[in-house]
Amino acid sequence: MRRIAFLLVGIATVAGVIAFTSTASGHAGEEAAPVFGIKIPPGYRDWKLISVAHEAGNLNDLRAVLGNDVAINAYREGKLPFPDGAIIARLAWSYLPSEENNKVFGRSQSFVAGAPTNVQFIMKDSKKYAATGGWGFAQFKDGKPNADAATLKACFPCHEPIKARDFVFTRYAPTP
């Protein structure tokens, strides 16, 4: 009886973790973005890190760029063009000073992620997205598409100058 109770508690714990993970991992399976019809891929928050960035100017955000296994393998192998099925996610947050960390350091030097601004995806399907270099584009905030058709149609022209890198801005960050 005791083993059954532990087993049931274990199953309930795993079920709770799975439910929390799918909720915390980014609203997968909801509404598709206009133009390219891309939905938030399930489990994208568990993808591997490609790089990080701080974007200054009007955006002034911190970014993490993640890739699914297809994208990560292509990066590691230096394979261009990226194969169909590669998906790259760009997560962005506002850029805030950390008063708590700065107290420890004795000066203003620490910055952390604040509120999330949005998540963007580029998805490689050379047939479906042939007119845009094989890439489809999507942008979401709080699990909902937050870019209209005109905004998404402007993505590819922005990526065109980096055609030699298969239209992908982010380079694979070296391991420290």
Image: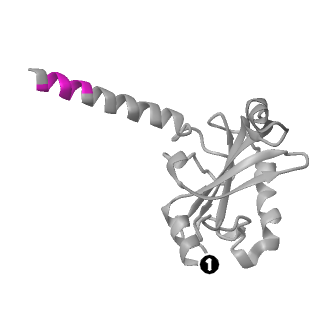
Question: Does 168 sit above or below residue 119?
Answer: below
Residue closest to the eye, 27 or 151: 27
- What residue lies at 59% left-to-right and 71% top-to-bottom? 126
Question: Is residue 27 something one can see in this rendering?
Answer: yes
Q: Which residue is mark 1?
A: 80
Please tell me which residue is depicted at 69% across the width and 68% down the height of the picture. 171
166 and 126: which is toward the camera: 166
Which region is colored magenta?
A: 3-9
The main secondary structure of the magenta stretch is: helix
Q: Would residue 31 be found to the left or right of residue 13 on screen?
A: right
Describe residue 70's horizontal placement relative to residue 120 as left or right.
left
Q: Secondary structure at mark 1?
A: loop
Q: Position of residue 142 (x, y in %)?
A: 65, 33
State which quadrant residue 88 falls in: bottom right
Q: Could you say which quadrant of the image residue 30 lies in?
A: top right
Question: Percent x, y for residue 170?
Answer: 71, 64
* Image colouring: one colour
Which three-letter amino acid code belongs to the residue tagged 1? Leu
Q: Image point 62% across, 78% down: which residue?
A: 80
Residue drawn at x 64%, y 69% is 134
Query: Where residue 12 sits: x, y (%)?
Result: 29, 26
Q: Is residue 41 visible?
A: no
Judge whether residue 6 is colored magenta: yes
The answer to which quarter of the image holds residue 158 is bottom right
